[in-house]
Image (cartoon, coloured by chain):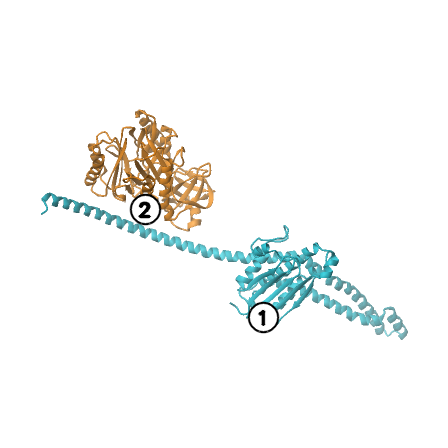
Amino acid sequence: MDTIDDLERQIQELEKANRILTKKLERSEKNRIQLEETHERQQRLLYQAIQGLERSLHELQQAQLQLVQSEKMSALGNLVAGVAHEINNPVGFVAGNLCEAQRSFADLCDHLNLYRTQAPASVLEEHAEAIHLDFLLEDLPEILTSMEVGCDRIRNISTSLRAFARADKDYKVPYDIHEGLDNTLLILKYRLRANESRPAIEVMTDYGQLPLIPCFPGQLKQVLMNIIANAIDALDEYSNGLGYEAIEARGNYIKIQTSVIEEQAIIRITDNGKGISEEIKDNIFDYLFTTKEMGKGTGLGLAIAHQIIVEKHGGLLEVNSQLGEGAEFVIRLPLTDC
Amino acid sequence: MFQVVVGHSNDPDGVAAAVEILEQCKSALQSKTPQAGILFAAPELDHRIILEQICQTFPGIQLIGGTSDGEISSLLEFQQDSVTLMLFCSDEVEFIATVGRQVSQDPIAIARQTAELAKAKATLPPRLCLTSPESLTTSGVTILEGLKQGLGQEIPIVGGTTGDQWQFRATKQFFGTEVLNDSVPILLLTGNLKFGYGVSNGWHPVGKKGIVTKAKGNVLYEVDGQPILEVYQSYLGDIRPSPEYRLAVYEPEGTHWYMRSSNGHYDHASGSITFFADIPEQATVQIVHASRDEIVNAAQVSVQQALERYTGQEPAAALMFSCTGRLYVLGTRAKEEYVIVKDSLNQSLSLNQQLPCCGFYTYGEIAPLKLQGESQFHNETFVTLLLGCQ
């Protein structure tokens, strides 16, 4: 049997345990309240963080759009001199022909006035010879036709530039990729011509049967412009190391081939320029990567092209090349919106 | 000889707790008489009774201490609402306790005089100073400055400011049988003392660094000319400032930094936030981040540093000062701090029995950041101090 002392000790221990438990309960209640406050604060913090992330995402998307648009305008800026030259040619011959047409028209008016004054046949005959009436009647329609051709060329260039510069809608629209390729080639035409260091670059197109492709046409033309302009750069650089005749013998060319394979529109743009090394190929679609001289390349062109094809269109952009053996860029686009 | 014993009771009754810790200590002392002691107790306990019981049991004991937010010992490990006592016996080390009262009236001068008085009473040159000063009535940084002036910059000062379990109303300091507030008790150690200290917090700076362009004491107004409340709101949105607002404050040399954490007070009109301790103008500051694992691991880093810096071979005891802010963040994991320290000590020292340990959760930790460096005031930090004669 327990002694009284033992029992007293047990009671004291139980009393102590009771005091400790009561205190722990009190502490536990305090902690619970503190936990609830912390939880509420964390919830608000989480909400703020989510809102902040959403805002940042939106700003990032806007910034990306602006970046794409400014790269496009930068590419266009680089072309301004060439395009101005391209427009000046037809403007020149329209202006030249206009003077000729005005003179011819004035001679014709004089001749008509002689008829109205019922001048004698000999006077009419003499005037007709003086103004070369037969040649004039034959030449004037040709002058007008040639002016019309010049105006058409100016209009085409203007339309292409406007189409290129135009911002896309925020949804995809069906688009004729061949039209995009032709527009781009028109804008770049002056760069394809012969110059003092190399003969003209031959463009070979082999267009297959492509349906209208759902896309952002402005962005897609930006990609085509970038790849074709890079091909011209590659051919220019390659030509720098060779003599004019050597280049003429091998021929500079850009081949553009389109086709449909397995529900994908394929656009192959091939050049026989200097080609791309393995090392450069690994980085070619990276942001701010450029092999061009300072001030010539932004390092954004192919990175944005890749982003446009892969992220915006769910397609693929690949490069196949070996150093010294030209390069092939392959764009694969889904035929249906994804 | 340097013997250290520990008592620890979680009995909320002051008398019963005093009896329990004294029985534990007497049993471990085996009739030796301790010269000095340090007591950490929860704010709600009857401190006067506990102090009187200790001083009656060991007349003439040099006793300091204060109220705490949590207590640590090698007996009950981590506890809250408890009381823990560490007693020191040595024939090679001298202990002198002094106290500065109403320290807020002139913190630097009063702290300096307190240190000078202890030095004057000592028969040997000072080696180390332990302290548990007031945290609410005045700045811990200025108290520390006064102590450094009184002792000399080369004497390490280690300890922590007293707490009141997040009430921020009144904390108490102990000196002999006296229960004080607005005071700075110190325990100066001289003689053949070996020691080593470690300081770590586990936090790491993130985001942009800024320069403090306006601060007064522990109230921070502007960083880079922008109200600090706005700076935080740009990170955290419209959330009330709380102890989660922490800053790394870089030392002028630009590499080492110490922590400051907010006590939750702020002023919308001036855009200022009040911190637990002073932040100097022109200091570089940066927001900090840590996971709970990193915070717990800092305790281990701290004890490893202390072991590496220990000037002898075999420490006889360990004192620990951990921030109440860490306790707040760690919650139920706070107990892991002591466990990790205990495991680390056991592994490194291969002892037959547990090293006597004692410590508390403070409103500000004090220790030099580096060896032979000046003592520094910290927040959110774990400080380990190893003591011995061998």
B309 lies left or right of A250? left
Residue B121 location in percent, x, y? 30, 25
Say if residue B275 shows up in the picture: no
B354 lies left or right of B276? left
Q: Assign a secondary structure to mark 1.
A: strand
Point 18% across, 45% down: residue: A16
Say if residue B365 shows up in the picture: yes
Say which chain tag 2 marks.
Answer: B
Residue B177 location in percent, x, y? 23, 33
Q: Assign a secondary structure to mark 2.
A: helix
Q: Which of the 4 image quadrants contains residue B309?
A: top left
Please give the residue where the numbered disc 2 appears in the rendered image: B336
Colour representing chain B: orange
- Crowd rating for badge 1 (residues with CA inside 10 Å; few <14, some 14–19, many 20+): some
Give the quadrant of the C terminus of chain B: top left
Residue B164 location in percent, x, y? 29, 41
Given residues A255 and B374, the one toward you in this image is: A255
Measure the alpha-carbon separation of dots 1 and 2: 66 Å
Give the answer, above or below, for where A80 lies relative to A180: above
Residue A238 location in percent, x, y? 68, 56
- Please state which amino acid type lies under the numbered disc 2: Glu
Give the answer, above or below, for where A209 lies relative to A310: below
Please give the residue where the numbered disc 1 appears in the rendered image: A260
- Identify the mark at residue A289; answer none if there is no mark: none
A110 lies left or right of A329? right
Colour representing chain A: cyan
